[in-house]
């Protein structure tokens, strides 16, 4: 199993879920601003998440690059507030309602890396 991680123009290949977790810890700790990291799973699925903040955005693309693009429904119901992070050279906004505390987002990413499927541990909607 090889998982490719891309963040801020750099790329790493990791061979285990633990190595992915270690790399995401490093990226989170080194981030100067909330930044998108993209994981390409061995089955071709893609998981994006924000590192470097106490909140995170997760997007799962089970048929990347084709839709659907799935995002979790988080714990903040406000329809107007946004979470801003840096992705692919520009600032990106998502609704706060689609963010999770970083610990919950990382747990969700571990589930996605392990199963390559959207788990039932959160509610999902199409982006």
Image (spheres, rainbow, N blue to C red):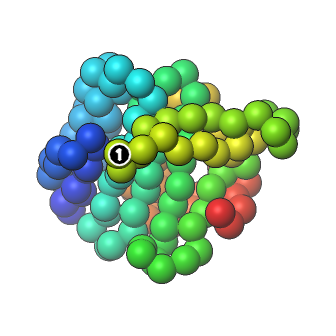
Q: Nearer the viewer, residue 127 or 26?
A: 127
- The x, y position of residue 26, in whole percent, is 26, 26
Report the residue that reaches farthest toward the front.
90
Task: Give the answer, above or below, for where 46 lies relative to 28.
Answer: below
Callout 1: few (<14), some (14-19), or many (20+) C-alpha neighbours within 10 Å?
few
Residue beneath label 1, please?
89
Residue 22 visible? The answer is yes
Quarter holding the C terminus? bottom right
Q: Nearer the viewer, residue 66 or 17?
A: 66
- The x, y position of residue 120, in whole percent, is 66, 57
- The x, y position of residue 109, in whole percent, is 46, 47
Task: Give the answer, above or below, for where 61 lies relative to 30.
Answer: below
Q: Residue at x 33, y 73 (%)?
A: 44
| 27 left or right, relative to 79 | left
Quarter holding the N terminus? bottom left
Res 75 quadrant in image:
top right
Q: Residue at x 21, y 46 (%)?
A: 9
Res 71 quadrant in image:
bottom right
């Amino acid at each position: 199993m090889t998982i490719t991680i891309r963040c801020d123009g750099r790329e790493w290949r990791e061979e285990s879920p633990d190595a992915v977790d270690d790399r995401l810890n490093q990226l989170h700790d080194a981030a100067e601003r909330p930044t998108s990291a993209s994981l390409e799973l061995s089955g071709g699925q893609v998981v994006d998440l924000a590192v470097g903040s106490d909140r995170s955005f997760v997007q799962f693309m089970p048929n990347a690059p084709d839709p659907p693009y799935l995002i979790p429904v988080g714990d903040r119901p406000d329809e107007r507030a946004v979470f801003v992070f840096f992705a692919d050279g520009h600032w990106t906004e998502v609704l706060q309602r689609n963010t999770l505390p970083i610990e919950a987002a990382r747990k969700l990413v571990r589930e996605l890396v392990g199963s390559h499927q959207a788990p039932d541990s959160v509610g999902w909607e199409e982006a």
